Amino acid sequence: MSSSPAISVAMSVYNGERFLAEAIESILGQSFTDFEFLILDDGSHDATRAIVEGYAARDPRIRLIARENRGLVASLNQLIDESRAPLIARMDADDISRPERFERQVEFLAARPDYGVVGTWSEDIDEFGLPYIATGPEHPSTHDEFLAAIESGGQLMCHPAAMLRRHVVLSVGGYHAAFRHCEDLDLWLRLASVTRLGNITERLIRYRRYPEQVSCRHATEQQVGAAIAKIAYEERAAGRPDPTAELVSLPPIADLDALFCRKGVAKRVLEKVSAGLRYSRAAMAGDGFTLLVGYLQSGGSHEGMWRTAGRLLRFGFPLRALKLGRVLVATMGADHGRGWSAEIAGGGMLDTATPAPANHPLIDRKTR
């Protein structure tokens, strides 16, 4: 391995023994071989460290960083700080990179110096490695398509498929701790104003979806963070200060008007999040249901909510379906929700009259 490799591969792992070996082997099997492989064990208490140590003993490109648990954002920023290469390739401990992934991405960036980040299309698989059927548009290939996807709320980039120029990521301060569980989305939105981003239209990563992933376990927090990240992006685009820039954690939704120094921000986030949460079984099983009920009790639109009650029955939550029905009856009025419903439609938010696609970016995004 050269003293200064072309790529630093950044992988953070927490209790990832189940899929880790397959993920590591997919990196070691890359056709482009000039890389260092940084694997940070974020305080695992399973066999993660032993697995990494076994591979590191056989391949000097692997460097294990083991410490107490600090979370994904701190781990990713540490990996960036410790990387020695001008390019950083993200990788997760439960996905599989195709052998030609790095080769294609290095070629892309070498031919396009104005691009700071490039991802790839993905092949979705389940926990057993079998095809996972997902609908919806592909990730945007060009920067113009990327900007259009930001405006429409579409998918942007598969995080573990990203390759980034190190100096560009450092120029925007790396990952922000406030956007835990949607730190990648916040980073893409901040990078979009200083560099170009795109995706190679080849499926160069096998992207695993399964119930234990973070987008299922932290669905509500993830969606709230994503909605706030989009508003912060709009603030920067309008030339206004970004009040989230120095935050360590995001405030409650009720405090967002004060944070952004204007009325209507909290209501907009509540509307946006409520529109997406109703499609997430994980969110409806947890605090997302409480948020949805609070939205209705504070005057939120009834549009699509009776279908949500039926969906709760399909999710296996009959008591929550009954409670939602009672809230709908109690808050029903001739003009109830008419203004909010029109505002949602006018703002281009998720159409609550139709089912959300399986890979809606604020539902099935996987961020560890």
Image: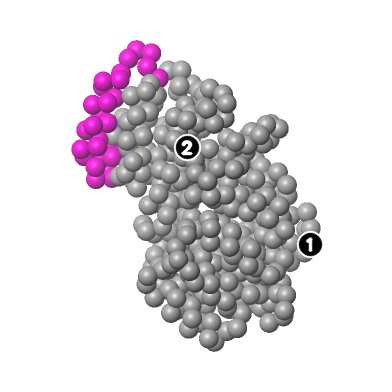
Q: Quadrant of residue 305?
A: top left
Residue holding disc 2? 251
> Residue at 72% of width from left, 80% of height from top?
2
Please indicate whether residue 262 sits to the left or right of residue 129 in the image: right
The answer, for residue 233, to whether it is visible in the render is: yes
Give the amino acid type for the residue marked by disc 1 in the picture.
Ala
Q: Residues within 10 Å of mark 1 (few under 14, many from 20)?
A: few
Relative to 263, say whether 42 is above or below.
below
Residue holding disc 1? 111
The answer, for residue 160, to whether it is visible in the render is: no
Marks 2 and 1, Cα distance to the nearest angstrom?
42 Å
Residue 347, position as x, y percentages in the image: 55, 28
Residue 226, position as x, y percentages in the image: 51, 42
322 inside magenta stretch:
yes
Please indicate whether residue 72 sits to the left or right of residue 149 in the image: left
Nearer to me, 339 or 237: 237
